[in-house]
Image (cartoon, rainbow, N blue to C red):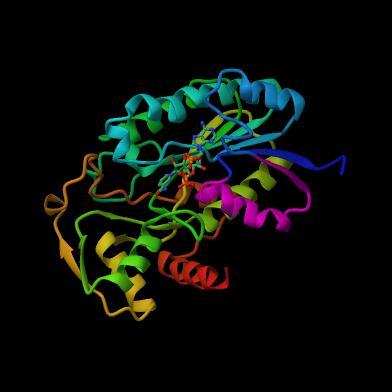
Amino acid sequence: MENKIKLLVTGASGQLGSELKHLAANYPDFEFLFTDVAELDITKPGQAEKFVAENPVSFIINCAAYTAVDKAEEDHDKAFLINAIAVDYLIDAARMSDATLIHVSTDYVFDGTKNSPYHEEDVAIPESAYGQTKYEGENLIMYSDIPAIIIRTSWLYSTFGNNFVKTMLRLGTEKEAINVVYDQVGTPTYARNLAQAILEIVSKISVKPIKTREIYHYTNEGVTSWYDFASEIFRHRSLSCKVHPIDTSKYPTPAKRPAFSVLSKDKIKREFNLSIPHWVDSLHQMLRDLDEK
Ligand SMILES: NC(=O)c1ccc[n+]([C@@H]2O[C@H](COP(=O)([O-])OP(=O)(O)OC[C@H]3O[C@@H](n4cnc5c(N)ncnc54)[C@H](OP(=O)(O)O)[C@@H]3O)[C@@H](O)[C@H]2O)c1
């Protein structure tokens, strides 16, 4: 018990946090302190520092975020508070506890004008309020003095919470046909795979600590569009609902999304020797996991 590695997880009732909870039992050497806004509101100055003063930890995994991409356009201040200012409070808490911060960011920091996978050092030009606030959170970490890892991911879905897969499963039984955009290209990511990758990285860092800050990209393997993603969900579930491909211009949203946001995983695979499942295999796995819940 004494030698267990202590990890604080913030925002633990969200998709990624819930997947970490689900995997926790597989990591007997770790002692997890799962918190969400009721136990630790990361936006309250001094709260994270107070928490780690009472419960010293070696890692802080920040799964808390403002993730309502369209709502963020009119609710910029709240998104900025959770996605940026609160990250500064977590940096202070990590420094106080001598902890490594593992932070999660997004493909929406890119403008999507490339047509080959984005690398970590590519210039970030966020085009939405959500992407901008997440980028500001990244920068606070990168210009800090604590050991930290930022993992950018994309198109996250899970057996927990609401997401595209669950929306499609509902619409697929309610409707005869739906329209889905085909001109936004990226990679879906099963949050359980990302949670597993984070815990593998923490295991490796706890043996060989890091001293600086690095950005990594993690998504499932492969490339698809939202249209093809929806089609595969319906095909696998034998849902007869038709999917019509439409242009983004026919489906206007308050927040602009990148047209192309495929992320290169070369760096994270090389550094941590990870093997990453293909998005189709992970989708099928998630649908099986959903059936077993
Ligand atoms: N979802 C995606 O498609 C996607 C794509 C790329 C990157 N990401 C990033 O991946 C990470 C995990 O995303 P996710 O989908 O798991 O998010 P999520 O399901 O929205 O979970 C976020 C959690 O943070 C909590 N939270 C909000 N404000 C908080 C506060 N002040 N203090 C403590 N907790 C707070 C939320 O509680 P409430 O629900 O009560 O607000 C929620 O439980 C985030 O950093 C996100 O930006 C997500």
Residue 146 position within the rendered picture, expressed as x and y whole percent measured from the top left: 60, 24
Nearer to the camera, 38 or 228: 38
Nearer to the camera, 191 or 207: 191
Q: Residue at 16% x, 47% y: name it.
A: 252
Q: In this rendering, does residue 124 appear at all?
A: no
Q: Residue at 25% x, 71% y: name it.
A: 175
Q: Is residue 33 above or below residue 44?
A: below
Q: Residue furthest right?
A: 2
Q: Image quadrant for the C terminus?
A: bottom right
Nearer to the camera, 202 or 33: 33
Q: Quadrant of residue 256?
A: top left
Q: Is residue 146 above or below residue 231?
A: above
Task: Provide the residue span drawn in magenta.
Answer: 13-34
Q: Is residue 99 above or below residue 225?
A: above
Residue 7 position within the rendered picture, expressed as x and y whole percent measured from the top left: 69, 39
Left/right placement of residue 286 relative to residue 2 reads left
Q: Quadrant of residue 134?
A: top left
Q: Is residue 89 above or below residue 148?
A: above
Left/right placement of residue 178 relative to residue 11 reads left
Q: Residue at 28% x, 60% y: name it.
A: 226
Nearer to the camera, 266 or 156: 156
Residue 149 position within the rendered picture, expressed as x and y whole percent measured from the top left: 55, 36
Q: Image quadrant for the N terminus?
A: top right
Q: Is residue 195 in the magenta section? A: no
